[in-house]
Amino acid sequence: MSYIKEIIDWAKDRNPGEPEFHQAVEEVLETLEPTVERHPEFVQAGIYKRIVEPDRAILFRVPWMDDRGETQVNKGFRVQFNNAIGPYKGGLRFHPSVNLGIIKFLGFEQIFKNSLTTLPMGGGKGGSDFDPKGKSDAEVMRFCYAFMRELFRHIGPDTDVPAGDIGVGGREIGFLYGMYKKLRNEHTGVLTGKGADWGGSLIRPQATGYGETYFAAEMLATRGQDFQGKIVAVSGSGNVAQYAVEKVNHLGGKPVTLSDSSGTIVDMDGIKGEKWDFVMQLKNIRRGRIHEYAEKFGARYYEGKSVWDVIRDEALKIDVALPSATQNEIHKDHAEALIKNGCFCLSEGANMPSTPEAIEVYQDKGILYGPGKAANAGGVAVSGLEMSQNSLRMGWTAEEVDNHLQRIMKNIHKSCLDAADTYGSPGNYVVGANIAGFLKVARSMLAFGVI
């Protein structure tokens, strides 16, 4: 049995009942096999074993009162995974599916994603099984206040800097930051994704969607192509999907799908102009469901189906896929259907949206595949830029931030290709992203000794 296989089995045995975390560990460590022989010092120092064990996992209860005056209790989580290269950094997710295993998988992925940005940020993640859908603003506020009354003890601008994720947007960040300020009596850059009027960065809401699109553009360029005239499938309809659609339109592509947990819309005329404006109003202000788009614009609506179900079942022809919803949304049969129907480039805006079996299909067929830790690093990259602006007590223009974002995504793309080539897997973005992200963290851990 190889050394890496021993570490994978060891991690699985120590963390039973956490399939998403097991999947993330296996996916990363298997690609690190070429580093073992070249870096015996990492083996001797136990770096591979230490990097799969979080520094600490914080679990707490979150009691709050709903609008009926009844007390509700949710679970709160913050996993501080690795701070070898900077403060823990990673989002907060509010969703009924949240559990410790999911938070650990997200925090583990965040280590390598943050490393790839070249910014000084470690890896962490947090959240709660609270569901903001269907809750009033007052209920969300009371929950966020209760959540922060515990979390504030464990975070700080030089310790741990959370951000948003699924279920945590500008509204939630505002409530969370308001309570942090009240408790600590200080105005610091402890959360990112803040409003532009009170310490936030321009382009932060757009960053993940823009970033995954920029990464796809870099991949397309390796084959002498661009987005001009490409038919693009985007899943989800939240922050990442919304701005992926906007940037695809800017680059000359035609986004034709969006989805939510109720179903999928397909608009072959393209989602742009007043249609995109409607989506922004629908999802960010009215918090409605995507079927309303179909009712207003006469698009096709597929109830209960994901974008990838529709592409499989309806033989929908597309060129580029931007999965931007949630983990494990694309299965093997979806991947096969994507390629059969013309897809040759896939850039992940969500965290681990493709199952291992789907990834095997991408790689067997040789399509351009940008894994999430590289392709969706734009969000945390601009979070890092927000931290920099907070430290400097100044703000940059939207153009300056967008230029930084484009440069970072270009550098991530180059780092992935360079590492893949150096370690014997030319063109393999999965291997390249994992190794490039790992080496910086591993060297830093080695420098600090056994701590």
Image (spheres, rainbow, N blue to C red):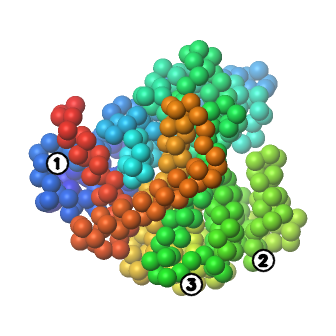
Report helix, strand or loop for mark 1: helix
Which one is in front in this view, the residue at disc 3 or the one at disc 1? 1
Report helix, strand or loop for mark 2: loop
Which mark, residue 357?
none
Count neighbours of disc 3 (C-alpha within 10 A) and say few if under 14, some if 14 to 19, many if 20 or more.
some
Name the residue type under label 3. Answer: Gly
Q: Give the labeled residue for mark 1.
A: 42
Q: Give the labeled residue for mark 2.
A: 269
Name the residue type under label 1. Answer: Phe
Q: Residue at x 49, y 76 (%)?
A: 221
Q: Nearer the viewer, residue 313 or 285?
A: 285
Contact check, label 3 and label 1, Cβ < 8 Å: no
Point out the tag, 2 or 3, that comes first from the N-terminus.
2
Name the residue type under label 2. Answer: Asp
Q: Residue at x 56, y 84 (%)?
A: 342
Specify the quadrant that holds the N terminus: bottom left
Point out the tag, 3 or 1, that comes first from the N-terminus.
1
Point out the tag, 1 or 2, that comes first from the N-terminus.
1
Which mark, residue 342?
3
